[in-house]
Image (spheres, rainbow, N blue to C red):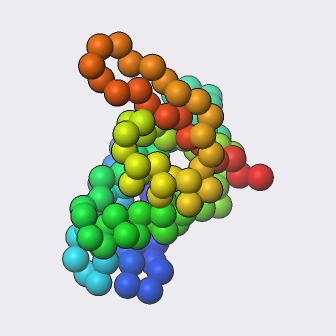
Amino acid sequence: MSHLLRDDKLELRPTSGSEQFIGFGVFFDDERVGTIVLAPAPGKQGKHEGSVRWNLSDGPGKALAAKILTMVIEYAFAELNWTRIETRIDEDNTDDWRAASLSGMRKEGILRQPGAKSSQMLLARVAT
């Protein structure tokens, strides 16, 4: 079960989840500005690794994205005992790439996509 995460006017409130994910509603000054989800990796890896995905509105959500990501990543390391967390971001999404980078995630590579779809960057952070 996830816990309420709070920092001043920013709150990450647990949403109903499942074994496949741990979700939070993101609130700033009591206004919902998005969501963020942790997903354990499949199988045994899921005990120690996972991924993060987010959807934040323009305005406060985008402005606080790095802080929101940092809070969730630190929660995954401290409370879930994960040792690695990753995300995939469309190569042309500079807002999300910047937020992930500011939260300590580092680029590990490019995942090429067939057709017109843009490539994705793989970013990750380890607990140590």
| Nearest the eye: 127 or 106 | 106
Kindly identify the residue that appears in the image at 42 percent across and 36 percent down. Answer: 91
Is 91 rendered above or below residue 11? above
Is 89 rendered above or below residue 7? above
Residue lying at the far top of the rendered structure: 114
Image-quadrant location for residue 58: bottom left
Classify residue 10 as left or right of residue 111. left
Q: Is residue 92 visible?
A: yes
Looking at the picture, how far across and down is residue 61, in whole percent? 32, 67
| Nearest the eye: 31 or 116 | 116
Image-quadrant location for residue 95: bottom left
Kindly identify the residue that appears in the image at 38 percent across and 75 percent down. Answer: 11
Looking at the picture, how far across and down is residue 101, in whole percent? 56, 53
Q: Is residue 39 visible?
A: no
Classify residue 75 as left or right of residue 36. right
Looking at the picture, how far across and down is residue 82, in whole percent? 64, 47
Is 37 rendered above or below residue 24? above
Residue lying at the far right of the rendered structure: 128
Count of labels in the image: 0
| Nearest the eye: 2 or 61 | 61
Kindly identify the residue that appears in the image at 49 percent across and 24 percent down. Answer: 111
Classify residue 24 as left or right of residue 50. left
Looking at the picture, how far across and down is residue 39, in whole percent? 45, 41
The quarter of the image holding the N terminus is: bottom left
Is 85 rendered above or below residue 118? below
Kindly identify the residue that appears in the image at 46 percent across and 72 percent down. Answer: 5
